Amino acid sequence: MSIACNTAKMTDKNGDLSFLNQAPSQWRDEPSKPIGYAPREETVFLSGGLTLLQDKLVEAALNSMNINFIALPNPDFKSFQTGKAFGNRGQCNPTYFTVGNLVKYLQKLRDEQGMSSEEIVRKYVYITAGGCGPCRFGMYITEYKKALRDAGFEGFRLTSFEHDKGIFQGEAIENQLIDFNPKFFVTLVKSVIIGDILNLLGYKMRPYEVEKGSTDSALAECKEIVSQAFLSHKSLLQAMWKCRTVLEKVKLDRIQVKPKVMVMGEFWAAMTEGDGNYNLHRFLEAEGAECIPQPILNRLLLSLWEAEQALNQNEGLAAAHSKSIDFANVKKRLLIRAGKAAVKTHFTLYAKAVGLHDYEIPNMEKLAELARGYYTLECSGGEGHLEVAHLIESVKHNLAHLVISIKPFGCMPSSAVSDGIQSLVTSRYPQANFLSIETSGEGAANFYSRVQMALFKAKQSAKEEYEALDIPETIPEKLNHYLYQPKNEKAGTAAQLIYSITV
Ligand code: SF4
């Protein structure tokens, strides 16, 4: 519960200062009068804010479990402005974008579709992830409630699962409307994983497509195939196999020298595909680059890794005080292991079926080892040590010509902690081409120009890497097929392909 003064009482038009003698009251997020909410069967659930593809797959996955769910449209600048208008000052911009996006959607229902605020509050519920922070993330739920109340939707219901407990959270939550049981999480995770795989393939293919727009059209078809498989409870593996036949039709010309750019940073800023990061991925592609996006899989595995670390510490403390075995911890550990195995197995199976062969599932232990010595691993919040680990990994294994760490203005874990440490990393790895960039302290023009400057250097590196190779006179046709994905010490796609047939 957040504590704040009730400022409404302090604005007395007549200049009456008697409020100064009143004890400050605590701000409460309960509605001021009782509300007769609609029963579960009439309730409409809302959420959103992942990638465009994932939002739609999540919608199909939840609809397949008889949850009347609608994915909200992608947050845009109007959402951000709405969030700012109704939110507290000093929040980070994922809060403004996501909170504003919900308020904007409800305003549209009210102002354009003629629903009353009371009916909206009675029937709609928003699903979100909650958590204890330690950054501003811990305040999200309260922010939603405050903004919704001020926008005229007092009492609007929110239901949340804790992002760091996820699949292991079988207990009832306050005002629970959805049973956050293992089936819910497994179905949700499947849709997110499939979205990751299709997105990863899309980013590998789009920069090399011969016909503009053909990759996006193929991905739209794949989205439809997978959605139908969810809704009709058919095999998702078969659906992914079918997607392979769709993607195979996209004609590629992959012997084009393009810099590879790893986009990482704060989870939401790095993942969103829209105004929330000035459309960074599409901007990079338009500027002639190939992106390596951060899949949501990273975040899932980090949450599991953090849960395991917390358990280890817990057990270490218990052992130090010679307590007997805590069977709840043993059960938790087994569940974490099962969760990790399930996530990795599903990812591998779906990736193989659709033909994503060269993607290595992030090894959280290895990443933690890379960051150890730079970042206190016990420090959670945001992406924790992952940003530092990604940069080191990228340099050590020559994964990209440029690493961009994107974060909302003033993001505590990313700007205030990771970026401070990255200067030590770049001083130890001077070959790193690293750009840290914020999304709202700087205007779009400044943002794009900084990206372009870093890209200039990346383009040079990609060219030098390619020109150092022994280029054959004729290029085998297989190099232009998306299923041919050699892995070697080169970073650029064209260089990887040529190198694979010349050594
Ligand atoms: S990680 Fe940064 S942007 Fe994300 S909730 Fe925390 S402070 Fe905000």
Image: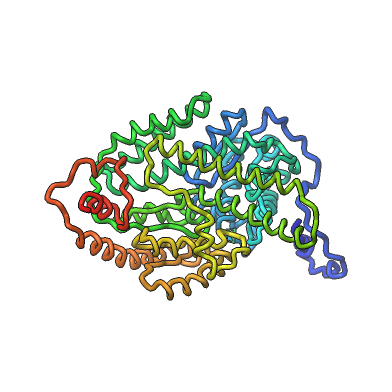
Residue drawn at x 20%, y 62% is 468
Q: Say if 456 sits above or below 174 in the image.
A: below
Residue 310 lies, in percent from the top left, at 67, 56
Left or right: 332 with respect to 9? left
Left or right: 284 with respect to 124? left
Q: What colour-coding does the image apply?
A: rainbow
Q: Nearer the viewer, residue 424 or 246?
A: 424
Q: Say if 118 sits above or below 393 in the image.
A: above
Left or right: 94 with respect to 449? right
Residue drawn at x 58%, y 33% is 62
Residue 186 lies, in percent from the top left, at 58, 37
Q: Say if 410 sits above or below 239 in the image.
A: below
The answer to whether residue 440 of the structure is visible from this angle is no
The answer to whether residue 185 of the structure is visible from this angle is yes
Residue drawn at x 73%, y 44% is 155
Residue 136 lies, in percent from the top left, at 64, 60
Classify the position of the N terminus by image quarter. bottom right
Q: Residue 431 sits in which quadrant?
A: bottom left
Quadrant of the rendered image holding ligand 1: bottom right
Residue 109 lies, in percent from the top left, at 59, 38
Q: Nearer the viewer, residue 323 or 229?
A: 323
Q: Say if 154 sits above or below 64 in the image.
A: below
